Image (cartoon, helix red, strand yellow):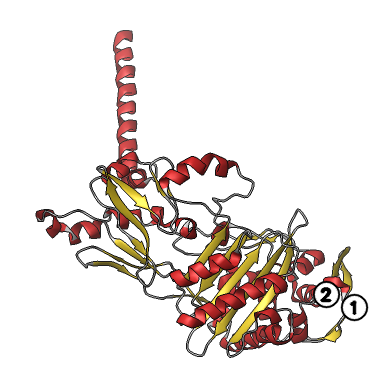
Amino acid sequence: MKYNKKIIHVLCLVCAMFLSLISYLVYFELFLSEDTIKNSYNRRLFERENEILRGDITDINGVVLAKSEFQDGRQKRVYPFSNLYAHVIGYNSKTYGKSQLELRYNDYLLGLDSLSAVASITDIFKNEEKKGADLRLTIDHNLQKKAYNLMGNNNGALVAIDPQTGAVLALVSKPDFNPNEDVLVNSWPDMADSESAPFLARATMGLYPPGSTYKTIISAYALENNMDEEIEDKGSINIGGKVFSNSNKKSYGKIGLKKAFSVSSNVYFAILAEKIGEEGIKEISKNFLIGEEIPFDLKVEKSRFNYGKMEAVDLASVGIGQGKLMVTPFQMALVAASVANDGILMRPYLLESATLKNGFTLYNARPTVLKTVMDKAVAGKLCDLMRDVIQNGTGKSAKIAGLDVYGKTGTAENEQKKDHAWFIGFCDNGSKKIAVCVILEYNKKSGGEVCAPIAREFFKEWDKYY
């Protein structure tokens, strides 16, 4: 009897193990297999690349930004412009896997998606070289080059977006790296340990206090709620035990929203934010996607709004873009884009199309509205404020004869008490518009001094082609 019980126990254990194995296999097949197959470190994908030529990646005008070549029976990925697109296209390395668009659109590039398989079925009977889909990006190579050169040796980012479609025309992060395999492998150990973090895509993943550029968001709430009263600006004010001062502690006397925005009065916006209150500050911040996921071809780090209950000092800090508030340059470019587009924020995108070598189109981008962040009337009033910044305020160095330029400068202090210089804005040449964000890390000068001139030269380059 005892012997039979032992057999039963063993059989139950074996059955339980068998059922567990079956359950795991079912779970793996349903939920994990695709992720494992597409993992950037999956060696079988690289073996597949010896059979299928990886698709090209081009800019909007057909300039080849990444291509593959067979050398000695093995495929080699080539990036003709080396560092220029490191934080957009990324790398395709047998040693370190894939990143950025090379990872995001690996299925298209290798023809792994189901639509590619169906569309290419006739190619099976042809004795031709197998090739994945070619990707055409929204990036304009001319503008990307200009942005890259304008950034010089500064750490930071420049983002440029068509506000009417959401198409990203330039996306530069510095420092950067050379994604070509031979160079990447040799330089990886040093770069991985570097304090400058060259692998960090600052445009989309870098988090910074927005400084005075956040006054654009605060002003949107004030305009929407008719809070344009005059405030006595004495150069500094104590709120909740903290002193908020203007640049050089300059006092402006009685000023309204327009003048305060133009000269970037910290006193005015600290008081204004306190009057708006916690509910209003949180509402308008969320409306501009602060702390929300931003859908995009590349990962965009969620901005931080780390407040529960807000005291007066917290409200004042957020009012001038400081405190427990961190944003990406990409997010602030979207703020400028929404103002430029009558309060309507278009969904940002990088991939314009994916096409097989037989001409079959797998994907074509269609501009779509992401959300309405403010009324058209409010956006129009905000345009007036941003226009005055360029004409009479802190953004004069972005002014261009014959073009309508709108902007907001900013200088933000981080935890190490080192300043970041900002500029957000847009340009209208009568037929097209472009929105930008420029940030320079750890700069000793203000956004109006160093970022606005970069935006100006970028706008002038854009006007040549659009």
Secondary structure under badge 2? Answer: helix
Disc ID at residue 234 = 1
- How many numbered discs? 2
Q: Residue at x 60, y 65 (%)?
A: 151
Residue holding disc 2: 267
Displayed quadrant of residue 55: bottom left
- Left or right position of 277 against 254: left
> For the residue marked with disc 1, what is the amino acid?
Lys
**Crowd around label 1: few <14 · some 14–19 · many ≥20 (10 Å):** some
Secondary structure under badge 1? Answer: loop
Q: Residue at x 48, y 51 (%)?
A: 178
> For the residue marked with disc 2, what is the amino acid?
Val
Q: Residue at x 63, y 58 (%)?
A: 155
- The percent position of residue 158, horizontal first and vertical second, equals 57, 67
Q: Residue at x 77, y 85 (%)?
A: 259
When the figure is inspected, residue 72 is found, relative to residue 373, above or below; the finding is above
Displayed quadrant of residue 272: bottom right
**Crowd around label 2: few <14 · some 14–19 · many ≥20 (10 Å):** many
Disc ID at residue 459 = none
Label 2 close to label 1 by CB (< 8 Å): yes
Between the residue at mark 2 and the residue at mark 1, the CA separation in whole angstroms equals 8 Å
- The percent position of residue 341, horizontal first and vertical second, equals 53, 82
State which tag comes first along the sequence, 2 or 1: 1
Whether residue 97 is visible to the viewer of this picture, yes or no, is: no
When the figure is inspected, residue 151 is found, relative to residue 265, above or below; the finding is above
> In the depicted view, which residue is nearer to us: 366 or 19?
366
Quadrant occupied by the N terminus = top left
- Left or right position of 13 against 184: left
Displayed quadrant of residue 402: bottom right
When the figure is inspected, residue 248 is found, relative to residue 190, above or below; the finding is below
- The percent position of residue 344, horizontal first and vertical second, equals 52, 80
